[in-house]
Image: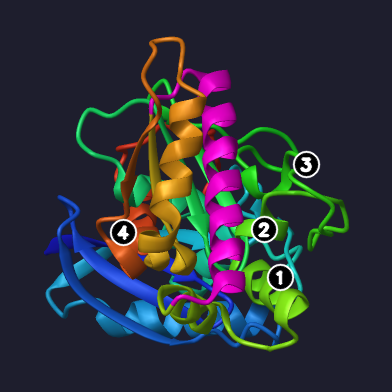
Amino acid sequence: MTGVRAGVDIGATKTLVVMCDEDGRELDSTSAPSQSHQGGAAILDRVAELVSSLVPDDAVLAGVGVGAAGVVDPVTGTVLVTGDSFTGWAGTPVNAELSARLRGVPVRTVNDVDGFLLGELLPEERNVLGVAAGTGVGGALFVDGRLLYGGATGAGEIGHVGRYGEERCTCGQIGHLEAYASGRALARRYAEATGRTLAAEAVAAAALAGDHAAQTVFTDAGRFLGQAIAHAAGLLGVATCVLGGSVVKSWALLEKPVREALEERPLLSGKPVSVRLSRNGAKSVALGAASLTAGIHRLPEVNNP
């Protein structure tokens, strides 16, 4: 029998599963609502159901990789910290509980933005910064050929560094990147400026139609995003950044301020950080997660249940 590997993206709205062959080629995919406010057990029940539905009759499931929202312990796969988009998710030992639901299949779990970056790496790349700007702003670091995990708050949290102004961040601090470059922030800042309540996508449409207030919030977001990328890349000696997330779909509005900020802050080489957009879109996290169990990436030691 052939072996297959599943990659899972557990988002606040939906869970996406991609089934891959041993070489990482996508075979099939499916998705369903995440049940994110029904607790960890319900979330993992849904994951196990989706994964099982995709295993071909003539194949054996060799492993499952998971990209999970929140700060994740890369050894145990336990979700340590999560936001208000989930209920009863923090404290869930994903590796052990999902493996038990799948009859002992090995499971590896990382933060969803770590999964995103793994899904976007090009062959032979060893130093890349990943940034996902959506409802929030997350980051991931692939340095010297491996993911950096950091301590209890997780490495790569680019959305929660810096002070770019006086806006309050979702974490309670002041001026973080997420307070300006997330979808929530774009909608909030536009409402503060105009009194009109619009979703981030609608604010983008207004900006493209010539709305000055909408253009301003996107310009600020792009400028601060570029500054944060330059600072992170310069500190770690990374010359490449890959961008994804729903906010980056409005690249036409973000590109100019992002690139201007990078040009103003070149690396020691004299060149700015090279930025590229996600190639795999909504499947990046799941595809990257699938590679976790294939021995492609060096990870902390873990005892599978």
The crowding category of the residue bearing disc 4, from other C-alpha atoms within 10 Å (few below 14, some 14 to 19, many at least 20), is: many
Most foreground residue, 5 or 160: 160
| Quadrant position of the N terminus in the picture | bottom left
Residue that carries the numbered disc 4 in the rendered image: 287
Q: Secondary structure at mark 3?
A: loop
Residue that carries the numbered disc 3 in the rendered image: 163
Type of amino acid under label 1: Arg
Task: Please tell me which residue is depicted at 72% across the width and 34% down the height of the picture.
Answer: 151
Residue extent of the magenta highlight: 210-239
Residue that carries the numbered disc 2 in the rendered image: 180
Mark sitting earlier along the chain (2/4): 2
Q: Which mark is residue 189?
A: 1
Rendering coords of residue 276 (x, y %): 31, 45
Separation of residues labelled 2 and 3 (CA atoms): 10 Å
Q: Secondary structure at mark 4?
A: helix
Separation of residues labelled 4 and 1 (CA atoms): 34 Å
Separation of residues labelled 2 and 1 (CA atoms): 8 Å
CB under 8 Å between discs 2 and 1: yes
